[in-house]
Image: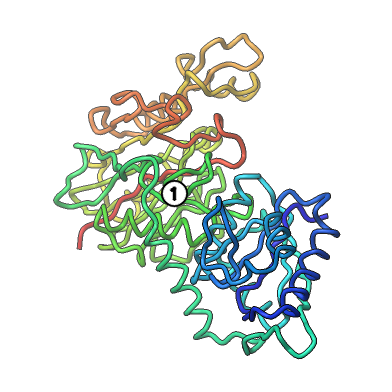
Amino acid sequence: MAEAVLIDFFGLQFNSQKNSHQALLKTLDAVRFHHAAKAKFLCIMCYNNISCERDGAPNNCELEGSNGLSTLLREFETVSNPSMAASLYTIKQKIDEKNLSSIKVIVSMHRKTLLKAFIDQLFTSVYNFEFEDLQVTSRGGLLKQSTEVSMITAQEVEAIQNEIQTYLRSLPALKGELTIITSPLISADIFLHGFTTRTGGISYIPTLSSFNLFSSSKRRDPKVVVQENLRRLGNAAGFNVEKFYRIKTDHANDVWIMGRKEPESYDGITTNQRGVTIAALGADCLPIVFADPVKKACGVAHSGWKGTLLGVAMATVNAMVTEYGCSLEDIIVVLGPSVGPCCFTLPRESAKEFHNLDPECVRLFDSPDPYVDIRKATRILLERGGILPQNIQDLNQDLNLCTSCHPDKFFSHVRDGLNFGTQIGFISIRE
């Protein structure tokens, strides 16, 4: 049974005659009868000509003359907007506020393909959509449907995407201004770089709000929202979002050397191409940025506890040395925001590997779930690999930035659960 029911009247034109009201009344009454007992959200999406009174004030209402219809309409939430993108995004917010995922869409056959195209852009696989044909008829043809084709062309798909992008660009930033943390160790004359926080984006779901930079089938943020957040980051930082590459995380130690064939998954990237921005994801896991100002090469790595033990940081360093002739003493490494040893625990068997690396990486080792310091372990492995201690900056240590401890600044899987947001560390070589 659907948790939410959406009736699409967006493409219908209603007149004010009695038979038209009766047909509409019959349709809404049938929806209420079949779904009101189980559905937690009943919604009508329409153009401004089917809105009804709210708080005693009419909103361009053409149906006020029918008392029965007006009363029934009050049992539905009405979203009325000239833009399909704005209407559907508003409905998505209402569905997300109630944490619903099973949605029935009642839509006329000639609009189903169009509506699906919008839904594909604005929703992820978290949501389960079921479609039912809307049949609104009255004697004498008093309800008229606008004529639309059932197939959508590539140009129409592009128009839908442009409408959505235009709407999302108009939305204000949430939870404060966009903030980028940078390191003084990395030359601003040669590189663009930084680490994002959670403020300044348009993501509104609490655990993703507001500057989430990753979309997946398990989260409620669609790619178009993440892409708008990324566009805003590119404008603020000065990089080209058309040349932006994220790590495809596998929690291992594979490194993609840009210019070679891209692997299916990897936790490090290196490049010496100018104008290309590479990024490592993080939400407790450690995003690491690497820069060699001498050879003008750079890299990023995603280091969770598994990747840390597998040596993904030094694997990225070694790729820079092998591919671009970098010297170990020239490479700068900045450890971005991640979970600290104050909040991160592992089962004792897994923590034992960190203890074997260095006992200082583990606190309360004799407990069932010791506290583990992946940042200290990463620094130890980098220094053992030949990176100079003075060339390593730990932002958590310098700025006290444990992701789990600072819900106002960072996303955290440990703190927020499965529907967590993601920040990034990024770098590019100036053109």
**On-image quarter of the N terminus:** bottom right
User: Where residue 198 sits in the image (x, y, percent)?
Assistant: 41, 41
Inspect the image, locate mark 1, and give the three-letter code of the amino acid beneath it: Gly
Residue 106 to residue 330: above or below: below
The number of numbered discs placed on residues in the rendered structure image is: 1
Q: Nearer the viewer, residue 72 or 188?
A: 72
- 270 relative position to 164: left or right: left
Q: Residue furthest right?
A: 34
Q: Residue furthest left?
A: 189
- 118 relative position to 74: left or right: left
Helix, strand or loop at label 1? It is strand
Task: Tell me how the rendering is colored.
Answer: rainbow
- 292 relative position to 221: left or right: left
Q: Badge 1, how many Cα within 10 Å: few under 14, some, many 20+?
A: many
**On-image quarter of the C terminus:** bottom left
Which residue is at a point 28% across and 25% down the rendered structure image?
A: 398
User: Where residue 426 sits in the image (x, y, percent)?
Assistant: 34, 49
Which residue is at a point 44% across and 45% down the rendered structure image?
A: 210
Q: Nearer the viewer, residue 31 or 334?
A: 31
Q: Quadrant of residue 120?
A: bottom right
Q: Which residue in the structure is indicated by mark 1?
A: 268
Q: Quadrant of residue 393?
A: top left
Which residue is at a point 31% across and 57% down the rendered structure image?
A: 234
Residue 93 to residue 199: above or below: below
Q: Nearer the viewer, residue 263 or 202?
A: 202
User: Where residue 301 sits in the image (x, y, percent)?
Assistant: 42, 45
- 125 relative position to 131: left or right: left
Which residue is at a point 36% across and 49% down the rendered structure image?
A: 173
Q: Nearer the viewer, residue 91 or 29?
A: 29
